[in-house]
Image (cartoon, rainbow, N blue to C red):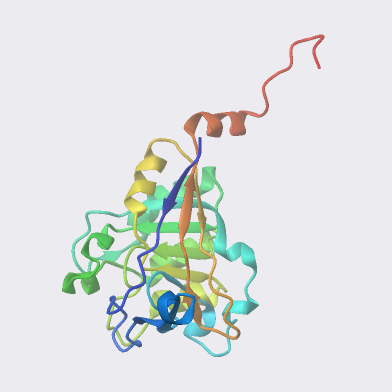
Amino acid sequence: MDSWIDLSVPVVTGMPVYPGDPRVEVTRALKVAEDGVNVLRLHMGSQSGTHVDAPYHVDEAWPTLDDLPLERFAGAAVVADVRGLAAREPITPDHLAPALGLLGRRPAGILLLATGWSAHWGTDHYAAHPWLTPEAARSLVTAGVRTVAVDALSVDPTGGAELPAHRVLCGAEGVIAENLTGLDRLAEAQAAGRSVEVFLFPLRLAGADGAPIRATARVGDPDQDVRARSGPPAVPDGQV
């Protein structure tokens, strides 16, 4: 049977945000005891928590969130397992070579960067994540990837003045999902021969640079994957 995995961090007051982004506040607006219903009041930026970036995030001439096709946000995925890299270590094309090879055998438009950095969520060390070099980003675009998701604060070094990996990926009208969690489970599932699908649908914010998402994954059964590749079972002669 398929297994579903939640890849999202919870939205709570004071959660980590990118330096300079609005602080997240979640408070009670209405209460059942007083108003007959419970309603939350949310104050947050478009890049809060687990979210996607549209190309417009880094260039006003590029597509906004609602300009993008829905297929950017869901589909078959390949995991690049780069766990074990040091703090602030660059992710190079060599690190991505196994995933790029898998893309040649299992076409997918979504690449998941499993750095393992979600283990540091909520700590100061979370900002010291590995980051994607522009050369590595270009290798993904060349391979047909248009959606990159990472279990870290950014695909670029946090706090840097430039965003070169963003510009490569977004310049190809791709999207970037950040602050995912649970990608280690997907890396292990892929290593066991299981297929991975991900769903990264954002809030429908008009003209937006990005939006929070409920990121999820569906991991297929290895036996089902083998049957899917080999086709339907043969029907014995004389049977319909």
The image quadrant that residue 83 belongs to is: bottom left
192 relative to 198, above or below:
above
Residue 168 in percent (x, y) is at: 47, 75
Residue 102 in percent (x, y) is at: 47, 45
From the viewer's side, name the closer residue of 235 and 23.
23
For the C terminus, the image quarter is top right
The image quadrant that residue 87 belongs to is: bottom left
| Residue at the far top in the pictured view | 238
Q: Left or right: 49 with respect to 36?
A: left
124 relative to 240, above or below:
below
Q: Residue at x 49, y 47 (%)?
A: 218
210 relative to 105, above or below:
below
Residue 170 in percent (x, y) is at: 51, 76
Q: Left or right: 133 with respect to 168?
A: left
Q: Residue at x 34, y 59 (%)?
A: 181
Residue 55 in percent (x, y) is at: 53, 79
| Residue at the far front in the pictured view | 33
Q: Residue at x 28, y 78 (%)?
A: 158
Q: Left or right: 131 with respect to 196?
A: left
Q: How many marks?
A: 0
